[in-house]
Image (spheres, rainbow, N blue to C red):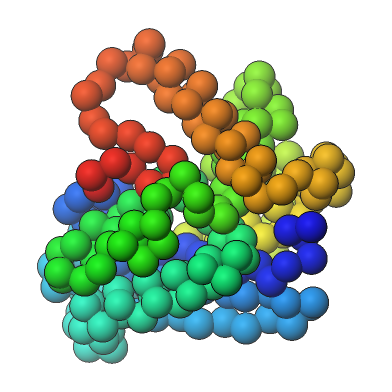
Amino acid sequence: MWVSRPRAGFDTETTGVHIAQDRIVTAAFITSTNGDIHRRTWLANPGIPIPQAAAAVHGISTEQAQRDGRAACEVVAEVAEAVAAHMLAGNPLVVYNATYDLSLLDAELRRYHLPSLTDRLGPSNTWPVIDPYMLDRYVDRFRRGPRKLINLAQHYQLSLDETFHDASGDVIMTLRVLDAMVERYPRLAQMSLADLHAAQRSAYEDFMAFIQRRYPSSEPRGWPIVSAA
């Protein structure tokens, strides 16, 4: 069962919310194997100014990133290597709102002429991704209200002792939310990663169809990665 396999949580903090143009500022990759936790974190110099609005969210200014951050191409390459190695071993990657983080990482790889995630992992319909945002929409489709990470933490009655909008803190909370979901819906633990993938993709497509009816858009979409990001 997937719940007994090593799992890794992944998150980024960035210069903004636009997948094609914004850049990674910090990233966290945290693996959990039988209770043994290993953390990797990165601080990048994104090569562009960090808007004040973004800095207010994650706390990293342009000056700090330029002073303490590593070259963005090096950071992006290392992050992608960690993500790909974990997933190629058949282990689940846990990413809250995976479409954003994985698509932005893929756009960064292409920007620096590095192998894309698809180059490294194969077609995205085979990736062992668990996205609690989409998984929550699968198990509780019609619940009203927002579904940000903090909302799910509250819904699943978790103590809010992690730092939100810090990559490491968000990863830890995402892993806790996933555990709480499995406890509430034990059938999730019995599903194969392939079945989980199909369920999340279906939840994504249903939600995007709803959004499209309300806010028609020609923007490319996809889960767990946007097509042609």
**The N terminus, quarter of image:** bottom right
Q: Is residue 125 left or right of residue 14?
A: right
Q: Is residue 52 left or right of residue 86?
A: left
Task: Give the number of marks.
Answer: 0
Does residue 118 sit above or below 172 in this rendering?
Answer: above
Residue 102, how many percent across, how many down? 39, 56
Q: Nearer the viewer, residue 157 or 116?
A: 116
Q: Is residue 121 left or right of residue 226?
A: right
Q: Quadrant of residue 86?
A: bottom right
Q: Nearer the viewer, residue 54 or 120?
A: 120
Q: Is residue 53 visible?
A: no
Q: Nearer the viewer, residue 35 or 16?
A: 35
Does residue 87 sit above or below 22 in this rendering?
Answer: below
Q: Is residue 208 left or right of residue 3?
A: left
Q: Residue visible at 62% across and 75% down?
A: 31
Residue 227, how many percent across, how many down? 29, 41
Residue 119, how many percent across, how many down? 31, 62
Residue 207, how many percent across, how many down? 49, 24
Q: Residue furthest top?
A: 213
Q: Residue visible at 50% across and 31% down?
A: 204
Q: Residue visible at 68% across and 81% down?
A: 37
Q: Nearer the viewer, residue 21 or 33?
A: 33
Does residue 152 sit above or below 2 in this rendering?
Answer: above
Does residue 107 sit above or below 143 in this rendering?
Answer: below
Q: Is residue 128 visible?
A: yes
Q: Residue visible at 45% across and 16% down?
A: 210
